[in-house]
Image (cartoon, rainbow, N blue to C red):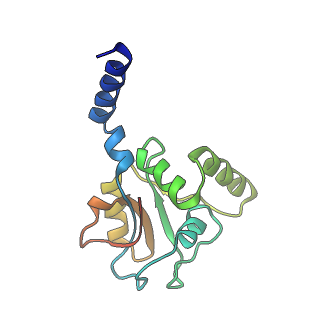
Amino acid sequence: MNKSKLNKQVLAAALSGLGFITSAAAQVAVIVNPKNPAASMTAEQVSNIFLGKSNTLPSGGTAAAVDQAESAAIREQFYTKVTGKQSAQVKAAWSRLVFSGKATPPKELANSAEVKKFVAANPDAIGYVEKSAVDGSVKAVLTVD
């Protein structure tokens, strides 16, 4: 085996062990409280909420959006797949909105367990977690690969 191929295998194994490869392949589920009447949402509706263009859920309630930690791999995946923007672009957009007084960014929580707990306890909450984390305490309204 040549050295280059071996280095790639070692790097892949190391990244996999750190969760980079497996988390990058995980499906992301946008979740709401089970009491929320919405059966599904479009990527555009979700994007509008998480980019500060709308603060309303399909039910008419005011969306209480929650974000994952900035360092979480799922956050980058969510924003890339749902909004078509990188985290840096999202951060810049929110900086402009906050500076102009037009909106407040989603509350940032430490991990998927915290997001799920918040959404389960708040009827107007919306967040995102790994699809594998969805259970009866929350309802998935959008899933992206």
Q: Residue at x 24, y 73 (%)?
A: 136
Q: Residue at x 67, y 48 (%)?
A: 92
Q: Residue at x 44, y 47 (%)?
A: 69
Vertical order, 26 against 17 (above or below): below
Q: If the image is split into quadrants, where does the N terminus sit?
A: top left
**x then y, percent, for residue 125:** 43, 70
| Residue 90 falls left or right of residue 65 | right
Which residue is outermost to the front?
A: 1
Number of marks in picture: 0
Q: If the image is split into quadrants, where does the C terminus sit?
A: bottom left
Vertical order, 99 against 122 (above or below): above
Front residue (pair 98, 9): 9
Which residue is outermost to the top?
A: 3
**x then y, percent, for residue 117:** 31, 63
Q: Residue at x 48, y 44 (%)?
A: 70
Front residue (pair 143, 94): 143
**x then y, percent, for residue 24:** 39, 46
Vertical order, 133 against 10 (above or below): below
Which residue is outermost to the left?
A: 136
**x then y, percent, for residue 39:** 40, 82
